[in-house]
Image (cartoon, rainbow, N blue to C red):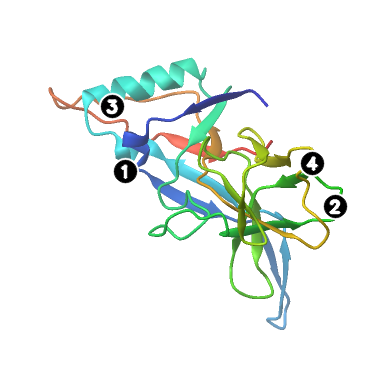
Amino acid sequence: MPFDNVRFPTAISRGSTGTAERRTDVVTSASGREERNARWANSKRSYNAGFGVKSLDDIQSVVAFFEERRGRLYAFRWKDFADFKSCVATATVAATDQIIGTGDGATAVFQLVKKYGTGARNYVRVINAPVAGTVRVALNGLVATQFTVNVLTGIVTFNAGSIPANGVVITAGFEFDVPVRFDTDAITINLAHFAGGEIPHIPLIEVRP
């Protein structure tokens, strides 16, 4: 997947709108009973960055970013201000935020994930784009340091000699971005006002590796 490891301007994404979408087939029988089937195992995010454009400088910034990404061709990072931490929005990231695995004495590689929900049907979201320098890891609640993080995959790899022992609970805390691409190859600009303008529709859609 063509991907540029750069983030869309956050001053603009802060004012955007976003959607979490799922696909469910619903078939209603003659009796009124329903059969429901999930077409997607994972939800998918989409955004409209147009609401964050407030000035001519913003317009030029978006157009430059769009041109550099070649429209829909190259994916990039997006900060979703509604959901960008391993913890709740008002809390500080901690190494114990999310369980990412249990040690067996041999496995050194673990995937960053974020859990949504509090019951039997928790949704576990794979985190592929953690923010560099924000990942904290703990082993049975004790902060660990002997590991590396791939910020393009969200994979945590423990150093040789520091592989988690059998039964050790591995947790992590982090900030993360969403890999997205432009969902259009055309940007329409409105310069109705002398000192400002708008790009009313800048659709973005989440991509998966």
Tell me which residue sits at (44%, 49%) in the image. 18
Kind of element beneath mark 2? loop
Residue 115 horizontal/vertical position (percent): 61, 61
Mark 1, residue position: 15
The C terminus: image quadrant: top right
Residue 111 horizontal/vertical position (percent): 71, 47
Kind of element beneath mark 1? loop
Mark 4, residue position: 161
Residue 72, compared with residue 167, is above or below; it is above
Mark 2, residue position: 105
The N terminus: image quadrant: top right
**Side of 84 relative to 193 (left or right):** right
**Side of 133 relative to 99 (left or right):** left
Q: Earlier in the sequence, mark 2 or mark 1?
A: 1
The residue under label 1 is which amino acid type?
Gly
Depth-wise, is mark 3 or mark 4 nearer the camera?
4
Give the number of marks: 4
Tell me which residue sits at (85%, 52%) in the image. 105
The residue under label 4 is which amino acid type?
Gly
Is residue 42 in sight in this rendering?
A: yes
Q: Earlier in the sequence, mark 4 or mark 1?
A: 1
| Gap in angstroms between the C-alphas marked 2 and 1 | 46 Å
Mark 3, residue position: 58
Q: Residues within 10 Å of mark 4 (few under 14, many from 20)?
A: few
Residue 116 horizontal/vertical position (percent): 58, 63
Name the mark on residue 153.
none
Q: Nearer the viewer, residue 171 or 67?
A: 171
The residue under label 3 is which amino acid type?
Asp
Tell me which residue sits at (51%, 42%) in the image. 134
Q: Residue furthest bottom?
A: 31
Depth-wise, is mark 4 or mark 1 nearer the camera?
4
| Gap in angstroms between the C-alphas marked 4 and 1 | 46 Å
